Image (tube, rainbow, N blue to C red):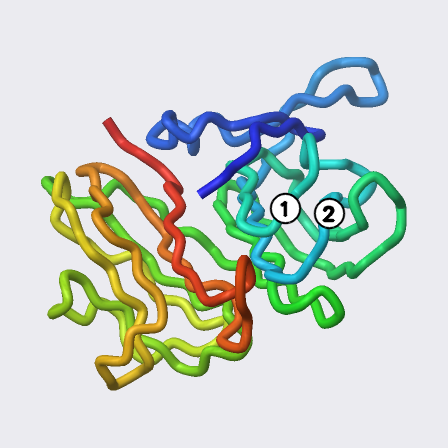
Amino acid sequence: MKKFKNSSCAGLVSIGLMCLLFLFMSSCVKDNNNSYVVVPTALLMVTQASPDAPAEDFYLNNNLVNHGALQYGYHIDYFNAYTGKRNAILYNYGTMTKIASDTITLKANIAYSLFLANTYTNPDFILLTDSINRPSAGNASIRFVDVSPDAGAVDLASNSTTVLVSNKSYKGYSSFTPLKGNTMYNFEVRQAGTNTVLATLDSVTVNTGFVYTIWLHGLAAGSGTSKLSAGIINNAQYY
């Protein structure tokens, strides 16, 4: 999974320190008396999941978030974002030609994932709340998200036997659930209720103390880079 280091109006958050984030999820700004005050913030991760989209820029209100072209399959690690109603805007990269915009609402001390989904001519903004708590002893935590607009309902299975998540359609997602850590898995995304495999993630080592999102993206009718694929994102890690 490709990702950016990024800057924003409120700065970059190190994913490896997620166990400490909720003590420090704030930003300093100057008030009218030229004194610094602490402003609570949210965390936001942004994933480009539109399979036929060209390179894009992502803005929150007037603030450019990404450094470099935001390409399909890339994500921006969690960054601090000011709370309240924010205007999420997509532009063609390097221009101010707007593709789409939507209003999202962010609450203080909450982590979110925003998927920029569907096709270039029919884009969707999918905002999820991320419950990235420390996994139980010896385990990791995994969530599944379906951002393929035409794949139909799907299941997520591991090691060809165990169904972890059932019957998720476009924009559907599971909660974060425990999975034995420090173990290698072969994941399959299947047509719901069948053994028909639509996409795979092979030989993935799931580490104890890590929090992951597995996501289905691409188009059932696609080919090349836009074909159905599964990816994995490391949301957080606890030491």
Q: Which residue is mark 1?
A: 71
Q: Quadrant of the N terminus?
A: top left
Position of 233 with respect to 99 (left or right) is left
Q: Residue 109: horizontal and vertical position, in percent?
A: 50, 41
Q: Crowding at label 1, few (<14), some or many (≥20) Cα neighbours within 10 Å?
A: many
Q: Please, what secondary structure does the residue beneath circle 2 have? A: strand
Q: Please, what secondary structure does the residue beneath circle 1 have? A: loop
Q: Quadrant of the C terminus?
A: top left
Position of 199 with respect to 186 (left or right) is right
Q: Residue 10: horizontal and vertical position, in percent?
A: 65, 28
Name the residue at the front extreme: 224
Q: Which residue is mark 2?
A: 56
Position of 156 with respect to 213 (left or right) is left
Q: Are the residues tagged 1 and 2 within 8 Å (C-beta)?
A: yes
Q: Is the residue 18 above or below the residue 183 in the image?
A: above
Give me the residue at 51% from left, 51% from top.
Answer: 113
Q: Nearer the viewer, residue 97 or 77?
A: 97
Name the residue at the top extreme: 34
In the rendered structure, which disc, 1 or 2, sits on the residue that comes first in sequence?
A: 2
Q: Is the residue 98 above or below the residue 133 in the image?
A: below
Tag 2: amino acid = Glu
Image quadrant in which you'd find residue 156: bottom left
Image quadrant in which you'd find residue 229: bottom left
Tag 1: amino acid = Gln
